[in-house]
């Protein structure tokens, strides 16, 4: 028995975007120290980290919003031509202090507090929105409306019309990438450092959909 022919369809992909003002800042400042032994490198790193944490807390940032990430101890190795083997010249200890705060105006002072107290890396700076649900809903509605509009234009051009939605696939919501700092490190701070100016701007919440619509030929 022959299967009845499937009705013609129109497949459309579409994307919706919503610009939202961020309400959170995430800052990562790092400390990297070197010494002949891991113990000495660790001691110096711990001293600087303690000063950085104290300076950040002095800005009014609660301890619960501050955490240490990626603590590591690595040997500094090189190949000695005379000895014909790898030798260790010392050790590097590094870690990153991450601060997440709803006080957007503190992002710059947090960076300055870190750099003024021994940090030699700005490992990350991200402005984001904590509650993205409303923006995601708006982006999704825009994506579906765009897909239907495109399907209707295509159907009309083909001498017919869109009858109904047959299939709808929603891709994962796209998270905006953190905007990197242009200057990732400073070797030394000046006597009177200029405060770091930052502009949080907006972030984009986006979603894409894949749709399939039933096409009906006009008589």
Image (cartoon, helix red, strand yellow):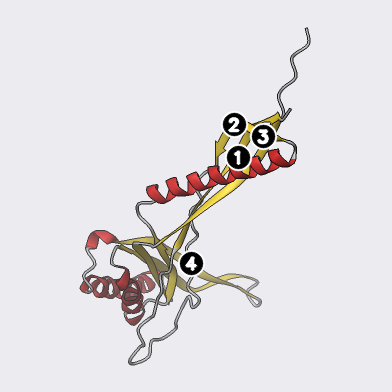
Q: Secondary structure at mark 1?
A: strand
The residue tagged 3 is: 161
Q: Are marks 4 and 1 in contact (CB under 8 Å)?
A: no
Outermost residue, top direction?
Answer: 1
- The Cα–Cα distance between marks 2 and 3, rounded to whole angstroms, is 17 Å
Of residue 35 and residue 18, the one placed in the foreground of this image is: 18
Residue 189 location in percent, x, y? Answer: 38, 87
Q: Earlier in the sequence, mark 4 or mark 2?
A: 2
Q: Secondary structure at mark 4?
A: loop
Identify the residue at image location x=59%, y=31%. 167
Residue 153 location in percent, x, y? Answer: 67, 44
Q: Secondary structure at mark 3?
A: strand
- The Cα–Cα distance between marks 4 and 1, rounded to whole angstroms, is 29 Å
The residue tagged 1 is: 210
Identify the residue at image location x=73%, y=42%. 157
Q: Earlier in the sequence, mark 2 or mark 1?
A: 2
Residue 75, placed above or below residue 163: below
Task: Nearest to the eye among marks 4 and 1: give it.
Answer: 1
Identify the residue at image location x=54%, y=46%. 143
Q: Are marks 4 and 2 in contact (CB under 8 Å)?
A: no
Question: Is 160 displayed left or right of 130 in the figure?
Answer: right
């Amino acid at each position: 028995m022959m299967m009845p022919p499937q009705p013609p369809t129109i497949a459309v992909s579409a994307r919706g975007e919503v610009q939202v003002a961020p309400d959170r800042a995430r800052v990562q400042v790092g400390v990297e120290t070197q010494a002949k032994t891991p113990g000495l490198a660790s001691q110096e790193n711990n001293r600087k980290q303690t000063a950085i944490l104290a300076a950040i807390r002095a800005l009014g940032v609660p301890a619960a919003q501050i955490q240490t990430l990626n603590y590591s101890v690595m040997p500094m190795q090189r190949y000695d031509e005379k000895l014909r083997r790898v030798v260790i010249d010392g050790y590097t200890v590094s870690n990153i202090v991450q601060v997440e705060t709803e006080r957007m105006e503190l992002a710059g002072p947090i960076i300055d507090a870190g750099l003024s107290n021994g940090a030699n890396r700005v490992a990350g700076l991200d402005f984001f929105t904590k509650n993205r649900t409303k923006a995601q809903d708006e982006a999704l509605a825009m994506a579906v409306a765009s897909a239907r509009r495109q399907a209707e234009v295509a159907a009309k051009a083909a001498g017919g019309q869109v009858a109904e939605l047959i299939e709808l696939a929603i891709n994962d919501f796209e998270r905006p990438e953190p905007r990197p700092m242009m200057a990732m490190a400073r070797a030394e701070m000046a006597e009177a450092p200029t405060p770091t100016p930052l502009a949080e701007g907006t972030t984009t919440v986006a979603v894409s959909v894949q749709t399939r619509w039933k096409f009906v030929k006009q008589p």
